[in-house]
Image (tube, helix red, strand yellow):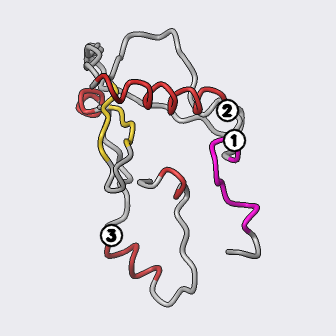
Amino acid sequence: MRKYKEVFAWDYPDMKGIHPQLCTHNIYTEKYVRPVRQPQRRLIPHIKDTVKDKLQKRLDVNFIYPISDRKWVSPIVVVPKKNGKWRICVDYRELNKSTQKDHFPLLLIDQVLDTLAGRKLFSFLDGFSGYN
């Protein structure tokens, strides 16, 4: 890993996106589901600046971007990490309830671990964020 450390993302500008012409992710909802607009949740005043800073970093590198479609709105949830810092998450529970079920679910964890057995190295697709 030390030999190829330049291929890893150490900060947000290091994360290269995938052009939408190459790959676009779509979320398909059930046919007769009405969109849900959840209200914004209040943030504890002392973490508002932290949230603004984290969101601005992501906006600056086009990791996220504003959209005008307001049919579905999910609130931000701020969760404490073990190290005392804050993690920004989005509460997609209402959207998840309305999505079409995937016919090809993720592998079971025991199958994933069996596949990794005997390997020298293992890397997460996005270990930078700490939870993917």
Whichever of labels 1 and 3 marks the residue nearer the N terminus, that label is 1
Identify the residue at horizontal 35%, vertical 30% (top origin): 47
Question: Please, is residue 42 above or below residue 85 in the view?
Answer: above
- Quadrant (top left, top right, bottom left, bottom right) of the N terminus: bottom right
Question: Please, is residue 101 above or below residue 39 in the view?
Answer: below
10 falls in the magenta region = yes
Return the x and y of residue 27 as percentages of the image width and height: 43, 31
Question: Please, is residue 98 above or below residue 41 in the view?
Answer: below
Identify the residue at horizontal 37%, vertical 64% (top origin): 107
Specify whether 64 is left or right of 51: right
- Which circle, 3 or 2, is nearer the viewer? 2
Q: What is the CA distance from the residue labelled 2 to the residue labelled 1? A: 6 Å
Residue labelled with disc 1: 13
Identify the residue at horizontal 26%, vertical 20% (top origin): 41
Label 3, residues with CA under 10 Å away: few <14, some 14-19, many ≥20: few
Task: Please tell me whether mark 3 sits on a helix, a strand or a loop.
Answer: helix
Residue labelled with disc 2: 61
- Quadrant (top left, top right, bottom left, bottom right) of the C terminus: bottom left
What amino acid type should be assigned to the residue bearing mark 1? Pro
Return the x and y of residue 90 as percentages of the image width and height: 35, 32
Which image quadrant is residue 42 in? top left
Label 1, residues with CA under 10 Å away: few <14, some 14-19, many ≥20: some
Return the x and y of residue 81 as percentages of the image width and height: 33, 50
Question: Please, is residue 43 above or below residue 13 in the view?
Answer: above
Q: What is the CA distance from the residue labelled 3 to the residue labelled 2? A: 33 Å
Residue labelled with disc 3: 109
Asked if the residue under mark 1 is in contact with the one under mark 2, i.e. CB atoms within 8 Å, the reply is yes
Identify the residue at horizontal 30%, vertical 41% (top origin): 79
Q: Which residues are magenta?
A: 5-14
